[in-house]
Amino acid sequence: MTDQPMVRFDNVSKRYGALTVLDGLSLDIARGEKVSIIGPSGSGKTTVLRMLMTLETINDGVIWVEGEPLTHMDKGGKLVPANLGHIRRVRAKIGMVFQSFNLFPHMSAMANCIEAPMTVLGMKRADAEARAAELLDMVGLSQKKAHYPSQLSGGQQQRVAIARALAMRPKIMLFDEVTSALDPELVGEVLQVIRQIGREHDLTMLMVTHQMGFAKEFSDRVCFFYQGKICEQGPPSELFGAPKNERTRQFLRAVLEAG
Amino acid sequence: MWDWSFALEILPTLASAAIITIEATLIGFVIAALLGLALALVRIAIPWTAWPISVLVELIRSTPLLIQIFFLYFVFPKFGVVLDAFTAGVIAIGLHYAAYCSEVYRAGFDNIPRGQWEASIALNLPQWATFRDIIIPQVIPPIVPALGNYLVALFKETPLLSAIAVLELMQTAKIIGSDTFRYTEPMTLVGLFFLVMSLVSAALIRILERLLNRRTPR
């Protein structure tokens, strides 16, 4: 049970009409592992997260979460498309933070963080608020609980979004280019929070990022995606230090020149 | 030309008829606003209903309200549905404006960014809670002015109910006119009543708009 992967992509494909976005992806992610996904745009890296969050359907293959199929269920030994109840039960283990924050603009930071714990987990308001206050404190926003998203900077909004996702007590956290929409001087505060939750919470983390420095320092493994496939993967020291594949070298060279 | 004592004499009769007009407006608008929302919601929640609903909406919007009122009052009894004039009239008005309102709601829903739905899924919110807590509170404030316009338009169309002899303001004024052969005072008073009420509701809608905008800073 313990050596079972937290997430397993088993030969997963995603197509939009004639365009194949992901081509037979197989990837195991261990419990507690921090995996960064890098690659040029259009390489399918964001799609990996969106499929795992069930924001996209998959065309082929099976995604497993803690040994359970995510969008399928077992019916007499055969895997059939799962009903919404099953999907919601498995999906509860996963939280996601988006590039564009996606906070609820009509709710304060606090209200953003207690909405789902109250409606989905059935927590009492007082308990949900206490938990949200802890999390907002942790992301350094204890003074901003009553503020609306429009009154917060991008970095602050993204930190609220992280607290909101953590309030659902996920086992897996997905970060989809979470610093790409931020002004450069605000990137650090968000990465600092991610670093901290990586240390303090027992989370499996999967992030799509353009911050190569952060990927290098933070992750246990880096996957380089190219044209819908994993082109190369390995520990950051190897992938960044001695990339084996020519495409990886090209990509890293281009990114380093730009950055 | 203008007889103040006659105007004062008919005022109480017109005032009680005005209550019927206001009742018809409010009940009609409640039907329009709720049914319009229901149509827009069903359309989003159950994709295959989009086509039949848009046909229904187009059918209602593209035929005159007066014909719809006559249909409900004179034709439905042939199918065993007998409604009194007020009920038939109010339902017809409500249905007619529900078609318009559903389009307003639809535009409102279309304006909600995809990210709001995706964040709701990522937080595992059930669909009904997503609508109730996340989507609808963001849809309503921007469309209050458009809904308010339809409220005023609906109000000004209630005189059509006089065609099926509902004793609302217009019908009452017509009766006074034909009984006394004096139309100047009753018609002027009715016109003034509509003018004042329209201005008052427009002002109320603006206040509501401002209140909603204050509650949701952007």
Image (tube, helix red, strand yellow):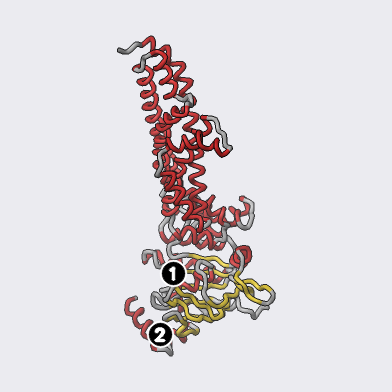
Give the structural element (helix, strand or loop) at label 1: loop
Mark 2 and mark 1 in contact (Cβ < 8 Å)?
no
* Residue at the image point whose x is 36% and y is 11% from the top: B4
Residue B7, x across and y down, in percent: 38, 14
* Residue at the image point whose x is 47% and y is 82% from the top: A230
Residue A28, x across and y down, in percent: 56, 80
Labels 1 and 2 within one chain: yes
Q: Quadrant of the N terminus of chain B?
A: top left
**Residue underneath mark 1:** A177
Residue A41 lies, with reference to residue B130, above or below; the image says below
- Is residue B5 visible in the rendered image? The answer is yes
| Label 2 CA crowd tier, 10 Å (few <14, some 14–19, many 20+) | many
**Chain containing mark 2:** A
Taking depth in this image into account, of B72 and B131 the one nearest to the observer is B72
Residue A49, x across and y down, in percent: 50, 71
**Residue underneath mark 2:** A248
| Label 1 CA crowd tier, 10 Å (few <14, some 14–19, many 20+) | some
Give the structural element (helix, strand or loop) at label 2: helix
Callout 2 amino acid: Thr
For residue A120, what is the image quadrant? bottom right
Q: Earlier in the sequence, mark 1 or mark 2?
A: 1
Residue B126 lies, with reference to residue A234, above or below; the image says above
Taking depth in this image into account, of B94 and A56 the one nearest to the observer is B94
Callout 1 amino acid: Glu
- Is residue A66 visible in the rendered image? The answer is no
In three-dimensional space, the C-alpha distance between marks 1 and 2, rounded to whole angstroms, equals: 19 Å
